[in-house]
Amino acid sequence: MRIDIRFSPSGSENYTVFIDEFQELNFKGKAAVITNNRVAPLHLEAFKKKVRAKELHEIIVEDGEKYKNLATIEYILNELFKHRLDRKSTLIALGGGVIGDMTGFAASIYQRGIDFVQIPTTLLAQVDASVGGKTGVNNYFGKNQIGTFYQPKAVYCESAFLKTLPCREFNAGVAEIIKMAVMFDKEFYDWLSTTDLNTQTDIQKAVKKSVEIKAKIVAQDEKENGIRAVLNYGHTFAHVIENQSGYGTYLHGEAVAIGIVLANELSVRLGLLSSEEADNIKKTLAKFSLPVDYHIQNIDSFYDAFFLDKKSGDSKIKFILADKIGCFTIKNDISEQMVKDTLKAFGR
């Protein structure tokens, strides 16, 4: 299966997302595969046999969101200089969303930009993080605060990688699938709410549908000046949760699941989403063993953290909310009191 991402003439170069079609990669110049110490023992050697390049180097970094920082980027860049990669070289991201984000960022700034391709090994990365060209790292002030928009040359989503994925990480990817379904496609959501995604056919369908949704949105709004912001449903809350819990307690998709529940509570209070629909979404998340409960220890601190989010501007918080399943609305005029009242519901 192939899904093409086609930008406007003034946008980035078009590319294709391949689903279960990977055979081998061929490069005329040097290449470096960037992965982590968790993925490498599982897939690196077999993957390298499918790569043809003038030289192929491997760069292995520590696994985990807490290593998604400038120190790791500096290590990657130093390794690229050490192996004398040039502007005709290519980086290969072999791993989940963290590896994809860091590899893309490194590619975008190394010698002012070289090519890279995405080989996502997690469900979350296949359906979301690897598609669309967002790159970056975290810092003290929040998630992905330092980064670029930089599109890959191609993305290869292989369901075989998912066979080695722990259930917890698989389910974290499902949260992003549910996110897109709630925002854009009720029929897709209804299907997700009644399936367990325990067959390859169902997984392929979920990946294909999710990538199609995201590809369509990214092609319309590459730099997130409009509709692409809708893909951040649940993320405004999730990024605060991740930051305040130290990028280790929750996987990204787990934080997104909680963020969806919080966003839905706000939507219900605004009269946009019915309580029945909010409960339905919560049950679907829970069906995939995703966390749906959260205790906010300090309401004021949580609220203030919203303003560190790069999607907030002019001292206003942008909330992406469900306006019934399959529809969305963007709000940046919700009163502080309404937001804090919503947060208080999770502060007990």
Image (cartoon, rainbow, N blue to C red):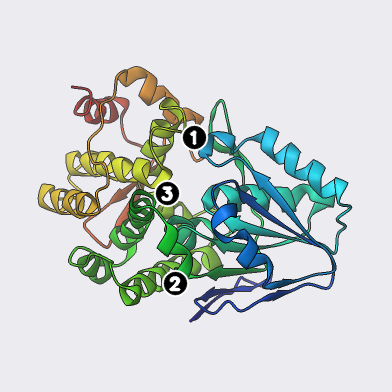
Residue with the mark numbered 3: 232
Q: Is residue 327 left or right of residue 166?
A: left
Q: Mark 3 or mark 1, which is nearer the start of the sequence? A: 3
> Which numbered disc flags the more N-terminal residue, 3 or 2?
2
On the image, the x and y values in percent for residue 227 come to: 45, 58
Question: Which residue is pictured at 49% across the width and 77% down the height?
Answer: 20
Label placed on residue 204 = none
Amino acid carrying label 2: it is Glu
Please provide percent x and percent y for residue 9.
Answer: 68, 72
Q: Residue at x 57, y 61 (%)?
A: 43
Q: Position of residue 18 (x, y in %)?
A: 54, 75
Q: Secondary structure at mark 1?
A: loop
Q: Which residue is mark 2?
A: 212
Secondary structure at badge 2 equals helix
Q: Which residue is mark 1?
A: 309
Mark 1 or 2, closer to the camera: 2
Pointer 3 and pointer 2: residues touching (CB < 8 Å)?
Answer: no
